[in-house]
Amino acid sequence: MTRPTTLADFAKRLPGATAQMATIGAAQVRIEILSGLTVALALVPEAVAFAFVAGVAPLVGLYAAFMVGLITAVLGGRPGMISGATGALAVVMVALVAQHGPQYLFATVILMGVLQILAGVFRLGKFIRMVPHPVMLGFVNGLAIVIFKAQLEQFKIGTGEDQVWMSGPTLWLTLALVAGTMAIIYVAPRITKFVPAPLAAIGIISAIVIGFDLPVRSVGDLASIKGGLPDFAIPDVPFTWETLKIIFPFALTLAAVGLIESLLTLNLVGTMTGQRGGASRESLAQGTANVVTGFFGGMGGCAMIGQSMINVKSGGRTRLSGIAAALFLLAFILWGSGLIELIPLAALVGVMFMVVIGTFAWQSIAVLRRVPRSDALVILLVTGVTVAEDLATAVVVGVIFSALVYAWNAASRIRALPRPSQSEQGALVYEIDGPLFFGSAGSFIDLFNPKNDPDLVILDFMDSRVVDHSALQAIEAVAEKYQKAGKRLQLRHLTPDCHKLLSNAGQLIVDTDDDPDYRIAVDYEVKTGRMGGGH
């Protein structure tokens, strides 16, 4: 008799988001939907503000937040992660929009998406694993500061050059509402978890402001969010080589910035939720979302760490929360603009301030005293560059600096330990210890002085590894030194490919049964009597 199919069995056969939704209970569904509503409320002022930064209409930012958020929620590599229009991308778009207009921006967003899809197809997202932990700490600290600074704009009144900081009763009232929001978020989970704390805080503070008609800024003071469904349209740009030369540099920068921010957020959310992998899938999802967004008049987007933190800490763990956030945002645009525009900005600022507190890696302050100085410097460097420039630049700088520090440390580990040979009478064996690569090649050559050595010298590479072209050239240089001194040199425990690639020293290699079988990092073209360049 065939065993009945249970809901869990059926769910395993369903793809992606559908399978996940079928396996969560009613209580979790409620949490996911309410968490999505909280995120949607926090997305509105961010999308509008970033649209202003990029120099486009507010609806362009809102459409991007809806479409990118929906597509990545369904297809992305990390359930619970939120994507939308971001400031990191907006600052790159400013020059393009100012010089060529929004239509060129939409074409650029499409090309950006294509590049991200290619990154996913070729699995380039896996290289995010090379980001060291100190860089991650600097990334989250810098991002927390950036989120904090972005909220300070809500303490200004006026527009354009006429903007001034709040003062007097308006400032004190706004600060009181912000503090009240933060207090509710802190206390609410201790009373009930039926409603996510940020949503409860927004609701209570909004009720107070509307009920008492308090004179504070609201979402409607930023811009009207009322609109219709986005329309499909091919960007109105010439399909010429000149157009490609204009948009490609921007598209490449946007694709890189978007993927770096998204994949770092993927790792951060994964750490909080105990999930792993998904980098290539996230790259494909981000690319697909941006291609679609470009055809529907959106400014493109990527993962948003602030909103992702709100979602995760509100209980959002599945794709349903991200889908709900996107659909709520669309509902705000179509039908709920009048109500959403009444929400005081102070409540949303308070929510984001709590995100800042939760995002900043406070333990990194104590860690600075305990970790090596180079790691402490990386944390501070990445934090500073994130605040001064952008996240992608900061991460690249941090990774390069960390790589140089590693290369310097590894270069100092190369050693040649001498001992008498047990098989060749009168010979001296140098046991090479440490990696031989471009950083240690010079030190390796300086380790040997043929004048002080016997007639037969053996270099044993059992505890070393030949890494690159510079290492091969260093071995050639040492062989040449002994040859000029009229002394014999033998090389042991080098791989077959090293043997092939060494032109002069290769004939000195002694084959043994326990030779290693690793391959060096690059391939070389070997020509008669000379070592060629790398392919």
Image: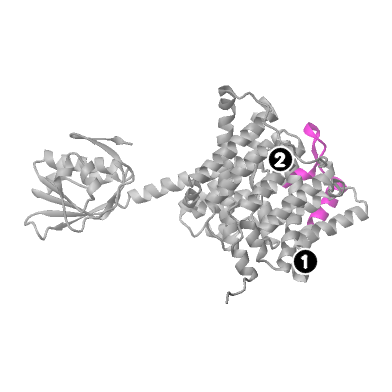
SS at mark 1? Answer: helix
For the N terminus, which image quadrant?
A: bottom right
Could you tell me how far apart the alpha carbons at marks 2 and 1 are, in whole angstroms?
30 Å
Does the rendering let one see residue 193? yes
Residue that sits furthest to the right in the current view: 212
Which amino acid type corresponds to the residue marked 2 in the rendered image? Phe
The amino acid pointed to by label 1 is Ala
Q: Quadrant of the C terminus?
A: top left
Q: Residues within 10 Å of mark 1 (few under 14, many from 20)?
A: some
Q: In terms of secondary structure, what is the magenta stretch mainly? A: helix
Residue 156: quadrant of the picture: top right
Residues tagged 2 and 1 counted as in contact (Cβ below 8 A): no
Q: Residue furthest left?
A: 425
- SS at mark 2 in the image: helix
Q: From this viewpoint, is residue 254 visible?
A: no
Kindly identify which numbered label has been placed on residue 226: none
Does the segment drawn in magenta span residue 275?
Answer: no
> Which residue does the image show at 65% across and 37% down from the upper left?
91
Residue in the image at 16% along x and 56% along y: 512
Residue highlighted by disc 1: 188
What percent of the width, then of the height, locates residue 504? 17, 39
Depth check, front residue: 66 or 344: 66
Q: Place residue 231 in its image quadrant.
A: top right
Work out whether residue 350 or residue 60 is closer to the camera in this orientation and state it: 60
Q: Which residues are magenta?
A: 151-179
Q: Who is closer to the viewer here, 16 or 154? A: 16
Q: Which residue is mark 2?
A: 50
> Residue at the location (88% across, 53% down)?
209
Considering only order in the chain, which callout, 1 or 2, is on the residue closer to the N terminus? 2
How is the structure coloured here?
one colour
Q: Nearer the viewer, mark 2 or mark 1?
A: 2
